[in-house]
Image (spheres, helix red, strand yellow):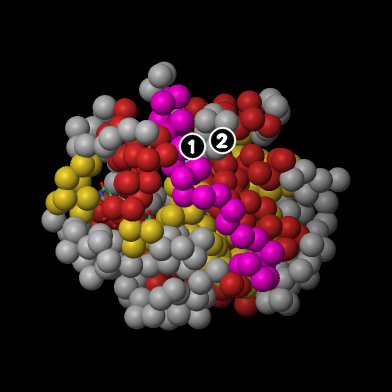
Amino acid sequence: MAKRVLVSGGAGYIGSHVTVELIEAGYEVVVADNMSNCDMTCFEGVKKITGREDIPFEQIDCCDAAAVEKLFTDYKIDAVIHFAAYKAVGESVAEPIMYYRNNLVSFLNILESSKNHGGCNVLFSSSATVYGEAEKLPVTEQTPRLPATSPYGNTKQMCEDILRDTVKATAAYGAEVNAGAQQLGPVKGIALRYFNPIGAHPSALIGELPRGVPNNLVPFITQTAIGKRECLSIFGNDYPTEDGTCLRDYIDVVDLAKAHVVAVSRMLDGKMKEDYEIFNIGTGRPVSVYELVNAFEKVNGLKLNYKFAPRRPGDVVAIWADTQLANNELGWKAERSVEDTLAAAWAWEKRIAGK
Ligand code: UFG
């Protein structure tokens, strides 16, 4: 029987792309989402792309321990991919309690139920933010994490540590499950540290749906191009980089989604080398903000209204991934060009604008 993967936060931007790839790889999926930062657009898109009308969807909040327990009782879950979290850096500085409560409690509940139901394989959605302003680039998984500069970043570091400690503590638990009864079992874990996910599915049926003014660069670009925003501000052109703008590692969301499938298979097929593993998920290719804006204009044949503006507080100058570990160990590599990704982002923006 096909293995079942619980995708928490599966109706959101990355979660919906991962759900598609899991289904296309032959997994069964159950999507859980409290819909706090999305609507049903992407879940409906997932059903269209996969031709599967019957994907189980549970509208629950992972901060509700009883609801998570019920999920693990109702479904036999072989692996969890945990996305359900708040993700806006600035908002986390203003509302730290809300961020710590939501991001930590939901993950603790997932881990608790995982160990109580015979053990589970847990993939945590982490971020390159854990590296901060790294001294040496590109960053490898061994690059030391620096103290987080926002509560959001701190929750990513803390959840990585909580997963590591849980894996260690549960390693010796027996894995047999009695029908219906709870049985302690080992938790195995992988943390994927994403760089900058951008783009949309080539079908343009799923993509990013930011609420309000986008914080991230690509949705701000596409909303400016469509006329929803007047002008893109490029935050800082006096950084110590070639063109003065920040460098990032922009990874296509479908490539990123595929990395999850490979990582989940590694856990389910017993291929892990350690019970807790960390992988950088990026392209290994630094691209400046200015280069990205130019590439968007070129590939989509349009002019973008933009201006240079002061630096944004909290931005690191440059970060990109050393992807060797993911390439060699997972046998996964980012494949899509930045141009194709930007064309997909634009196709998605046009689709949601009805153009
Ligand atoms: N940028 C602009 N104008 C904008 C938006 C962004 O110039 O309107 C610039 C930023 O200054 C930065 C680059 O575009 O140089 C990328 O910014 P994003 O906000 O898209 O992405 P970040 O690299 O800041 O954020 C990413 C993830 C976060 C994570 C953060 C940690 O999206 O989840 O890395 O560094 F917390």
Secondary structure state at the residue bearing disc 2: loop
Residue 130 sits above or below residue 260 on the image: below
Q: Is residue 90 magenta?
A: no
User: In the rendered view, does 318 fall on the left or right side of 312?
Assistant: right
Q: Does the magenta stretch include residue 342?
A: yes
The kind of residue on which mark 2 rests is Pro
Residue that badge 2 annotates: 202
Which residue occupies the extreme right position in the image?
A: 1
The kind of residue on which mark 1 rests is Ala
Residue 113 seen by the camera: no
Residue 92 sits above or below residue 206 on the image: below
User: In the rendered view, does 12 fall on the left or right side of 353?
Assistant: right
User: In the rendered view, does 107 fall on the left or right side of 230?
Assistant: right
* Quadrant where the image shows the C terminus: top left
Q: Which residue lies at the image location 67% right of the left edge and 65% below the top edge? A: 330
Q: Which residue lies at the image location 51% right of the left edge and 50% below the top edge? A: 337
Label 1 or label 2, whichever comes before in sequence order: 2
Residue that badge 1 annotates: 344
Q: In which quarter of the image is residue 22?
A: top right
Closer to us: 119 or 148? 148
Residue range of the region highlighted in magenta in the rendering: 326-352
Q: Does the residue at mark 1 contact the one at mark 2 (Cβ under 8 Å)?
A: yes
Residue 71's x, y, as percent? 64, 44
Q: Which residue lies at the image location 73% right of the left edge and 58% below the top edge? A: 265
